Image (cartoon, rainbow, N blue to C red):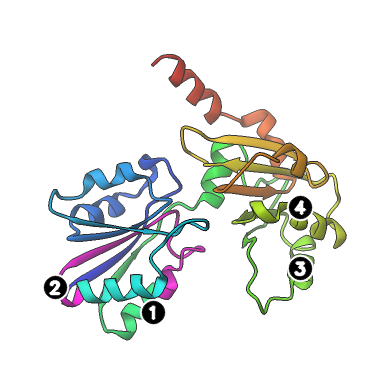
């Protein structure tokens, strides 16, 4: 019987994968990787490693989750070492927990290799700390996509009155609704807000506004973009760093 490593590849910058994550790629016989994984990481794989692209593109073709689960089980039963390579952290909106459940049900050995999630890394590369002693002592990582049975009004009311910083994944298409619901349920309309497009990558872009203005300011932003809401956003004016460093590096090429 083989073994499966469920690995977080990090937020985009290939240097942000963990050492253990790299080792899992190096020893794999099969790598199942998602759309948001930086392809540069595949260079660590052995020449004869089988690479299988799983997609996970909201607007494109993907291998259904049930088939991904079946592939992991099938390869492991053949005695192979399988690395399931996922963007960010596998246990934060990465369905890693579901995949681990399947492996456990089939009595297949597995390890979880955490990764840096974009909810922390993208704001950090935009000069926005998700907590700060003077601005925020609480942060919530939430999805902009609600399950069918979720009561949307209650969900956003809880968040409007709860954590000081909100990091919202998969929410760009619903940004107008998210802003409206947060204001409707008590967040001041002048609350700072930001969108970070492809955070930590060489094409990172950041838009800053408030709950009242961010929809217009970031009207051209697409996925993958991280939404950050809270007073910490205003710190970008003081400690923005990556985009200037990236521009300087490009100028010297």
**Left or right placement of residue 234 versus residue 10 in this view:** right
The residue to which callout 4 is attached is 176
Examine the structure image and report whether residue 156 is included in the region drawn in magenta: no
Between discs 3 and 2, the one toward the N terminus: 2
Query: Is residue 134 visible in this depiction of the protein?
Result: no
Answer above or below: position of 146 versus 89.
below
The residue located at (39%, 79%) in the rendering is 101
The residue to which callout 3 is attached is 158
The residue lying toward the viewer, choosing from 53 and 95, is 53
> Marks 1 and 4, Cα distance to the nearest angstrom?
36 Å
The residue to which callout 2 is attached is 79
> Marks 2 and 4, Cα distance to the nearest angstrom?
49 Å
Query: Is residue 153 visible in this depiction of the protein?
Result: yes
Between discs 1 and 2, the one toward the N terminus: 2
- Image location (x, y in percent) of residue 80: 16, 68
Secondary structure found at label 1:
helix
The residue located at (48%, 18%) in the rendering is 248
Q: What quarter of the picture does the C terminus occupy?
A: top left
Between discs 1 and 4, the one toward the N terminus: 1
> Residue 4's image quarter?
bottom left
The residues colored magenta run 76-98
């Amino acid at each position: 019987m083989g073994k499966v490593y469920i690995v977080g590849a990090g937020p985009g910058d290939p240097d942000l994968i963990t050492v253990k994550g790299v080792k899992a790629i190096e020893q794999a016989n099969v790598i199942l990787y998602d759309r948001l994984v930086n392809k540069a990481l595949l260079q660590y794989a052995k020449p004869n490693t089988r690479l299988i692209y799983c997609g996970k593109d909201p607007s494109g073709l993907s291998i259904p989750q049930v088939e991904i689960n079946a592939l992991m089980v099938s390869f492991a039963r053949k005695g192979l070492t399988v690395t399931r390579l996922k963007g960010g952290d596998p246990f934060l909106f990465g369905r890693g927990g579901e995949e681990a459940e399947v492996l456990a049900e089939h009595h297949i050995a597995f390890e979880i290799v955490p990764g840096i999630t974009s909810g922390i890394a993208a704001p950090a590369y935009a000069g926005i700390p998700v907590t700060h002693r003077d601005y925020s002592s609480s942060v919530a990582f939430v999805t902009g996509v609600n399950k069918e049975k979720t009561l949307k009004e209650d969900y956003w009311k809880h968040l409007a009155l709860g954590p000081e910083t909100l990091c919202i994944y998969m929410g760009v298409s619903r940004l107008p609704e998210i802003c409206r619901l947060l204001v409707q349920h008590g967040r001041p309309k002048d609350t700072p807000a930001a969108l970070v497009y492809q955070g930590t990558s060489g094409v990172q872009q950041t838009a800053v506004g408030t709950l009242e203005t961010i929809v217009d300011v970031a009207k051209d932003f697409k996925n993958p973009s991280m939404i950050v809401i809270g007073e910490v956003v205003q710190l970008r004016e003081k400690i923005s760093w990556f985009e200037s460093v990236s521009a300087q590096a490009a100028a010297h090429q």
